[in-house]
Image (cartoon, rainbow, N blue to C red):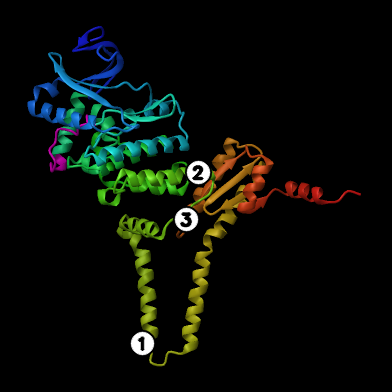
Amino acid sequence: MIGQTLKHYEIESEIGRGGMGVVYRARDTRLNRPVAIKCLPQEFSLDADRKRRFTQEARAASAVSHPAIAQIFDVDETEAGLFIVMELVEGRTVRELLQAQELDSLGALEIAIQVAGGLAKAHESGIVHRDIKAENIIVTSDGHAKILDFGLAKRLDSAPGADGATVLSQMETAVRTRVGVVVGTLQYMSPEQARGRAVDGRSDVFSLGVVLYEMVTGQLPFAGSSPLDTFHAIAYEEVRPVTTLRPNLPGSLQRVIGRCLRKRPEDRYPDARALAEDLRLVKEEIESGTSRPTPLVVRLQEQLHALRGLTPREWIVPVVGAAVVVWVLIRLLALDRASTPALLSLAVMGLLVYRRIRNRPFRLVRIFARRVAKLPEVRYVIVDGQQITVVADRALAKTCVHASAVVDDTNARLFFGRPFVVAVRGDLSGAEVARLMSRARTLYARPDLLDAASDDETPST
């Protein structure tokens, strides 16, 4: 195709290829501008109904204008087949950035915020992408994210309402005939999309949650050894929290990603705009280093979702405990001569137990500080809400590994509440440490630092 002409577009070079066809760099000779041309697989042209639906969707997507969406200019057909003309976006895909390990948590959040804004605009226009993945998000040299292939992505050739066995059969056939095409996309599919059911904007929200999970952890949340295993994981398995894989990430980010990856569409964000708003709050939290309190409604929703995921065996302890409490109360109330002192004693005991459980997080974080303080390079341990900052002479790898292991152990012993997150900092100046200590609680300070501070306060004679 290189050197050939499609209508008034001169093909200059190949950019890439994938399951949806081959992409070329070309020049629009009428407007004298560079464009990207995607030549679609031959089956698009052979099926008249499919071609008609594709053309309608491409034209609808071309009407969506947003900085985070690569614009569609034209869709046409020649003897060689159907092709689509798009804005040429120069940059690197999120997949390439991940492979080069050039993304940090703030960069990942900024990309996700921009993509969510583009999705919100498209969804409001009635357009669903259906193939949000690391390869379809490109970041330009000036740091702007663009969504590629809007309106082009198609599910497997299964009608809405097809059963799981039919979808899996088609999936395996597609994998045998086009290795790597379906598997890569499948890992980003929502449960309803993987089952071949009708999708809406909440399916794109799920897929963006998968991309964000991958950007901040370097791992895909659903990645089986076969398409069947991946399908099962998407449909039924809960993902590991990002704070387990990277303990320095804030709990608020885990809540956002967790809500995106809910199995039922109604449990996810209702739209991409609400997702973008929460992502901005998480970004502000990371930039400022301060934690925001979680609204009561959100905490209750998280607890209810967690309860739905319990196995019958895990239900035994809370159910038996609640039954014992109810039985004791009924017995006390049934006594005709229940003495006031007995009731008061029960109330005091309940209060003591409550205080013991309520103060458990604070006791655990103090234990954390004592354990981490055994490392000679640790200077201070400072806690602000659920955020623990370990200030060290140098942020050595062993320091980070040890602190992460200890905080994982601490979180495993929590009965309730949000998990702690830890950050090891070896790059803070004295003034930055002082500001941090002024707004948070210092649980540990190395003795030589205290001695130095005392010497500085001693008046000279």
Q: Earlier in the sequence, mark 2 or mark 3?
A: 2
In the rendered view, does 206 fall on the left or right side of 91? left
Q: Amino acid at mark 1?
A: Ala
What residue do we see at 59% from left, 56% from top?
366
Q: Position of residue 451 (x, y in %)?
A: 77, 49
Quick one: quadrant of the N terminus?
top left
Q: Is residue 438 visible?
A: yes
What residue do we see at 80% from left, 47% from top?
456
Please tell me whether residue 195 is drawn above or below residue 33 in the rendered image.
below
Magenta residues, as a range?
151-165
Label 3 residue SS: loop
Q: Amino acid at mark 2?
A: Ile
Q: CA distance from mark 2 to mark 3?
A: 14 Å
Q: Earlier in the sequence, mark 3 or mark 1?
A: 3
Q: CA distance from mark 3 to mark 1?
A: 42 Å
Is residue 351 located in the magenta-colored stretch of the structure? no
Q: Nearer the viewer, residue 338 or 48?
A: 48
Q: What residue did someone put label 2 on?
A: 286
Q: Amino acid at mark 3?
A: Pro
Q: Position of residue 112 (x, y in %)?
A: 38, 37
Label 2 residue SS: helix
In the rendered view, does 160 fall on the left or right side of 455? left
Q: What residue did someone put label 1 on?
A: 334
Q: What residue did someone put label 3 on?
A: 293
From the viewer's perspective, is the residue at label 3 or at label 1 nearer?
3
User: How many residues crowd mark 1 within 10 Å: few (<14), some (14–19), many (20+)?
Assistant: few
